[in-house]
Image (cartoon, rainbow, N blue to C red):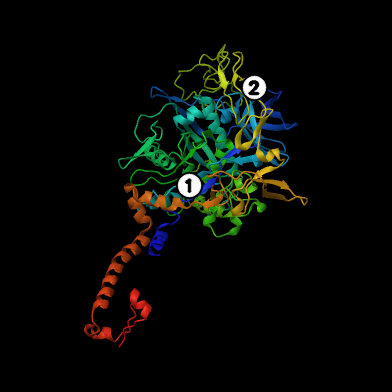
Amino acid sequence: MLIHFLLSLLATPGLASETAVIESPYLQSLHTVRVSEHRSEVPPNDLSAVSFHLSGERIYLEVERRRGTFHHNYRSTFVSSNGSTSGGIHSLEIYHGTGDNWAVLTRISPGVFVGAFSWKGKDYHMDPSFIINGSMTDDTVVYPVEDLIQSSTPSNLTYAPVLEEAPSPLSILLRLARKRRQTVSAVKSRCSLEVVADHYFFTMVGHKNQAISTRYIAGLIERVNAIFIKIDWGEDNDGMPLTNMGLSIKHILVHEIPTNEANHYNSHSSTFLQHNKETPWDVPNLLQSFTRVNSGRNRNRYCLRLLLTARPVNTSVRGMAYVANLSKSGGICADIQPAGLQYNTLVVNVFDGTASRLLVTREVDLIISHEMGHAWGANHDEDYSKEDCKPSFRDGGLFIMHAHTLSGYDENNSKFSNCSRTAIREILSDRRDNCFEAERVSSCGNGLVEEGEECDEGGRFHDGSNHCCTHECTLIPKAKCSPLNDPCCSPTCDYHVKGYECQQMSIAHCTNISRCTGTSAKCPAPGPVVDGTSCVEGGSCLNGRCISYCERLGKKNCMCEKEHESCLRCCSSSTDSGESLCVPVEGAPILPDGFKCIIGRCHNSTCIRDNNDIVSQFFGQLSDRSSWWALISSNLVALLIIVSLCVYLPIACCITTRDNDMPVSKLPETKQRQTTAVYTPMQMNNQVVFSQ
């Protein structure tokens, strides 16, 4: 009991790392569509709508171009093979819905989009086919959020243990002084980001293409920003509204090659050296390295710094961040610590190493939103006592900050609970004036293709090594495209040669290989594989689609809420009363080990709770000498109690043992007058009591 008591003193929210689990869904209903683009007849003939056919129905989305979530001094940098850097160069086209249907879309290339939209009250996501099969094509994959199905390995999201040092008195005084000098302004609504992509991300997600890499990142932050800006966080301590609070990309840094440095987050090494012991890379190690490396440069330039990786690590942890709170220095606008570190960092891995696949955008959106929530000040919803922050699926499902957040089946999965909003409101009230900024417009030369521009190679930052686009943001004569602006363009400003493989066979996608024609920047649509070919989750291909187990029964995938049923394959269907009922399917195989269930993971058809992270993170913390002072200062009361007990208990035991061994006649007189009830195991049975 004493050990449990001592551990409970140390396992405070700031010290222990808890684990949130978000299922890693495969796609249940993959719809390959050819998107038609409709442009305005008024110059510059911007895109005004997109349309495509989905399950026999024509989807028509009216859109308008937006400049996206970019800082007015935005720039992007690519670290090349010779170690030099070039200015960020890419063409970004971001569109929002203007009609009755909500939409946030990023145009990757002609006819290829990534994003999300709603249609007739139903939410859908769009992915370029390279996310599914690893190669470029001119097709887009559309799937309803409710039709996502789980993989056999859950994705774990954690917030980091307390590595930050206690704020110095000087830093606290300076922060208060800044707060007194500043006038609270509602226009300070953007948290500036530095987004860093390692060489694994550049290769696996970006296909070694600068345009694809930056477009993917831009679309990702745009969708996450859409979740944040629509939330009313309440009012700050001065009564000013905390609305339209979002994100702003200030710098994108992409590593094209590995960094030849031990323990660098961008190294190609498969192991991380700590205390002269090599361990496999994982997300906690990446966060530690990313924090250490980036704290040495660009201090206080960014509100948050995000590392995106596609490193194939054999672990289910996908994301990690430092939690912001009023007494510690992690999260948004974190102060620089005496040791020079700044804990405003978070890491997200977009590759599922256990399943050897890239995560789809819906998964990545929720993971980054969850980790951003930690960095903005929210803990897990189950850390709070309010039951309305942990509703059942009948009441909308769990919220985004719950430790067992689902992959998007339920309405609340992409929303913040009242508990999270209250916690984040306190942090925004305390910190937003320290580093949040106002929105401002941009212009030619920032690396973004905006209204009236044919291209934009980042004139103010560009080193001149590429010249398919002029500094006036127009294509040079005879240039068909730019390799820095268009994903399927060659270095000679022309199309790739005929026969270039632009899409591999994809069993999950039910598509065959496709090759370029040499006359277009587009990749021809791939043909379907043979009907009946096995695909993911016991499904089979039909006309180029993977039909899942539940879909073959005319039902939808779900997770049974009863613990003893949550490791059975469950499907949902509407009852006569119109209520959706999630029940096990008779005769269906049980879910494999490692599958996400209602409280943890499945093992031998039983749902097992996983509680290993608290203890493992605690003892991992003790092994890091650099954080001992932070550990002591953050848990001073608990440590004083432990030290006192360590001194008191041995002395008390010695005195008790001595008294028991001393004859009664030799006990001091004052002692003999007391009634003594000291029991040994033998005496306990005989009820022996020494008394006068």
Q: Position of residue 194 (x, y in %)?
A: 47, 36
Q: Residue furthest bottom?
A: 692
Proximity of marks 2 and 1: CB atoms separated by less than 8 Å: no
- Report the amino acid beneath label 1: Thr
Q: Position of residue 223 (x, y in %)?
A: 59, 38
Q: Residue furthest top?
A: 478
Residue 158's label in the rendered image is 1
Is residue 627 positioned above or below 359 on the image?
below
Amino acid type of the residue that numbered disc 2 sits on in the rendered structure: Ala
**Residue marked by disc 2:** 525
The mark tally for this picture is 2
Please tell me whether residue 676 is drawn above or below residue 105 in the rendered image. Answer: below
Q: Earlier in the sequence, mark 2 or mark 1?
A: 1
Q: Tell me the quadrant of the picture where the N terminus can be found.
A: bottom left
Q: Is residue 477 visible?
A: yes
Image vertical order of residue 465 relative to residue 640, above or below: above
> From the image, which quarter does the C terminus lie in?
bottom left
Q: Is residue 197 above or below residue 334?
A: above
